[in-house]
Image: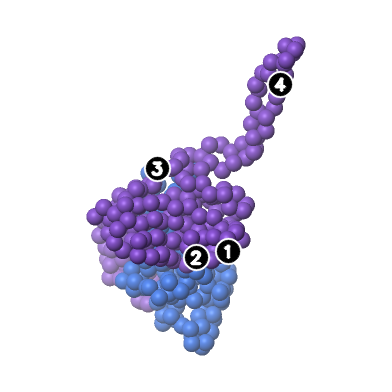
Chain colours: A purple, B blue
Amino acid sequence: MTAAACTPVSWLRLERYALGELDSRERAEIATHLEACGRCRACADQIAADTRELPPLPAVAAPAPRRRFAWRWPALAAVAAVAVVVVFVRRPAELPMPSGARVVAVKGGDVGVELVRERAGSVAWEPTSFAGGDRLKLLVTCPAPMRVFADVVVLQSDGVAFPGEPTVVACGNRVPVPPAFRITGAGGATVCVLLDASGPPTRAWPPGAAEPTASHACLRLDRRD
Amino acid sequence: MELYRRYGPALLRKAERMLQDRDEAKDVVQGLFVDLLQKTLGPAIDLPYLYRAVTHRCLNHLRDRRNQGRLVSEVDEASRGLARTLLDDRVVGRRLLARLADRVDEQAWEILVYAFVDDMTGDEIAALMGVSRKTVVRRLATVRDEARKLDADGGGA
């Protein structure tokens, strides 16, 4: 199983070694091994030399506690003003949608759609413009265990492009719809996602009568190079 | 988020070794932490726990048939990193992982990653997954058999 004569120190142990998370006995054991094993030392050096920055995490609000229902106690003045009537109003459980998400009704539940733009390590949510090298990604928020088929569409003056393949998305909070993509054509663009809970959406634009179960959401982007 | 700052780079390197695509690896790691941000985390969240979580996410990514063709055709060999543990004589990279997806079960597939991508010993794998060492050895034997059959079928990496 082993390529070299030594039993390698796993990547996980090397990472924990670099983070200073191992006890003194294990640290000493690995240090001794690294002195003798060039391949493992090369891996440890690779970890130490990797100074690439992490992409920033989006600001995500903690979801409000999910409630099966909420009670309201509005007092209603009866016409005869004889008594105060207590009314209980039942509110259905709902998945908190990220603010700013476009909400699309799909069979089985609502789907929130957001666009994210990544440029030189910085992330913009719901951008209104893009430049040549920007990386774009659509995220959907919908209630598990729902699954929905999604297909990304990019519309420009010179035509319609589908950067990926129709993909089934297991619902959750801000689930990426593959692939992340870049827009290469000239001029502005409209980025859309076709959504269908019953099967892969047919690749036609605009979606029409042939696709009665499909929904879509779009976002217009100006080009600013 | 402190966990992301502390463990994000290690997890990104790990995802990149499995997926051999930095952008996809970033998506996987970011997706994990976006989900974690929305949960109340217990004190047991450490690097081994997150390593497993990222492994599962990468395997799901590879399992997705819609990703498979693209993943297999666009391999960045440099991002696999130094291979220290070989399956027979082969480096286990994204191509082989994707091709074994339908041939082994989830547990064997996960063990394959720990053994041949992460270079863990049988004892480490057993401790990480909470299974016996005997199970690890047995599942690795299955993986090896299936990889050989893949060669025999002409579909090796």
Marks 1 and 4, how far apart in space?
A: 49 Å
Mark 1 or mark 4, whichever is nearer to me: 1
Marked residue nearer the N-terminal end (1 or 4): 4
Residue position marked by numbered label 2 in the rendering: A204
Marks 1 and 3, how far apart in space?
A: 39 Å
Marked residue nearer the N-terminal end (3 or 2): 3
Marked residue nearer the N-terminal end (1 or 2): 2
Q: Are marks 1 and 2 in contact (CB under 8 Å)?
A: yes
Residue position marked by numbered label 4 in the rendering: A86
Mark 3 or mark 2, whichever is nearer to me: 2
Disc 2 marks a residue whose amino acid type is: Ala
Same chain check for tags 4 and 2: yes
Marked residue nearer the N-terminal end (4 or 2): 4
Give the chain letter at badge 2.
Answer: A
Point 41% across, 82% down: residue: B89
Residue A1 x/y as whole percent = 44, 77
Disc 4 marks a residue whose amino acid type is: Val
Disc 1 marks a residue whose amino acid type is: Ala
Point 40% across, 75% down: residue: B73
> Could you say which is closer to the camera, residue B104 or residue A102?
A102
Compared with residue A65, is residue A184 higher up or lower down, i.e. above or below?
below
Numbered label tally: 4
Mark 4 or mark 2, whichever is nearer to me: 2
Helix, strand or loop at mark 3: loop
Residue position marked by numbered label 1 in the rendering: A210
Marks 3 and 4, how far apart in space?
A: 40 Å
Give the chain letter at badge 3.
Answer: A
Mark 1 or mark 3, whichever is nearer to me: 1
